[in-house]
Image: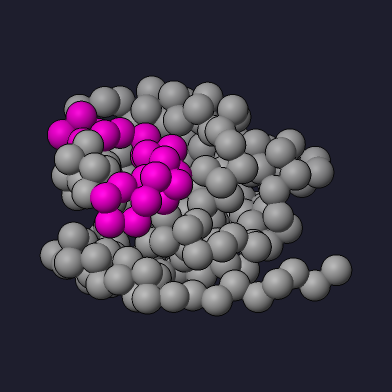
């Protein structure tokens, strides 16, 4: 059955403008690509997976808390875009400020977030998986262009990175997440596995 089309309003335009301002000086790690490219990509994936305007705005702002001001930023997001957007943004954050994010061990932080994601509500899971899809695709592209050594720009080891995305995939599959997210994430996990010389068959038990 065809869903009703999602009509984006000025709120979405305002969210793009807001994301442009708060992420203005940021680029994708290890590149010169404006960080806004990632945020727009996540919002697009949210819409492709059936998300509505609130969730697409949360996709644009999903890194606002951990990278752009912590809980005071969350309060501002809530005031501007409402409780639902703010709740999803917080649910997509694995830290509430940039400093604690840097200080905490990579795998400890990711393990805690995976535990959170397993019990997250569908709104948070949808936006979070859209983020993971876009990130995983970028990792695959980087590996193909520069080799596995490119993963040294991340705080975790290559195996930890693979394990993280593999577990995100398993959570999405167990929750019955939209195939617009699980299929590209599955393909990316396979490609990362191959790049590491691991057995991609470990990621195909679906």
Where residue 90 sits in the image (x, y, percent)?
37, 39
Q: Nearer the viewer, residue 45 or 86?
A: 86
Q: Is residue 11 left or right of residue 169?
A: left
How many numbered circles does the render carry? Answer: 0
Q: Is residue 150 magenta?
A: no
Most foreground residue, 8 or 206: 8
The quarter of the image holding the C terminus is top right
Extreme residue toward the right, this view: 1
Horizontal placement of 125 versus 155: left or right?
right
Q: Quadrant of the N terminus?
A: bottom right
Q: Quadrant of residue 86?
A: top left
> Vertically, is 175 above or below 28?
above
> Which residues are the magenta region?
78-102
Which of the colour schemes (rainbow, by chain, secondary structure, one colour) is used? one colour
| Residue at image location 30% in from the left, 25% down from the top | 105
Can residue 134 be seen in this snapshot? no
Q: Is residue 101 magenta?
A: yes
Is residue 161 placed above or below 182 in the rendered structure? above
Residue plotted at (59% across, 60% down): 51
Q: Can the viewer see residue 44 in this picture?
A: yes
Q: Main secondary structure of the magenta part?
A: helix
């Amino acid at each position: 059955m065809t869903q009703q089309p999602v009509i984006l309003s000025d709120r979405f335009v305002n969210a793009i403008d807001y994301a442009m301002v708060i992420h203005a000086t940021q680029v994708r790690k290890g590149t010169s690509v404006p960080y806004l490219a990632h945020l727009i990509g996540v919002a697009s994936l949210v819409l492709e997976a059936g998300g509505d305007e609130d969730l697409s705005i949360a996709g644009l702002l999903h890194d606002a808390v951990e990278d752009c001001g912590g809980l005071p930023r969350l309060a501002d997001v809530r005031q501007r875009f409402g409780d639902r957007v703010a709740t999803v943004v917080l649910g997509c954050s694995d830290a509430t400020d940039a400093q604690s994010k840097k200080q905490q061990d990579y795998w400890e932080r990711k393990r805690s977030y995976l535990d959170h994601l397993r019990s997250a509500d569908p709104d948070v899971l949808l936006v979070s998986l859209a983020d993971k899809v876009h990130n995983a695709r970028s990792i695959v592209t980087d590996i193909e262009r520069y080799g596995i050594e490119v993963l040294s720009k991340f705080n975790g080891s290559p195996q930890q990175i693979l394990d993280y995305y593999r577990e995100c995939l398993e959570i999405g599959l167990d929750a019955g997440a939209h195939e617009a997210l699980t299929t590209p994430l599955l393909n990316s996990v396979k490609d990362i596995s191959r790049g590491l010389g691991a057995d991609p068959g470990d990621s195909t038990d679906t």
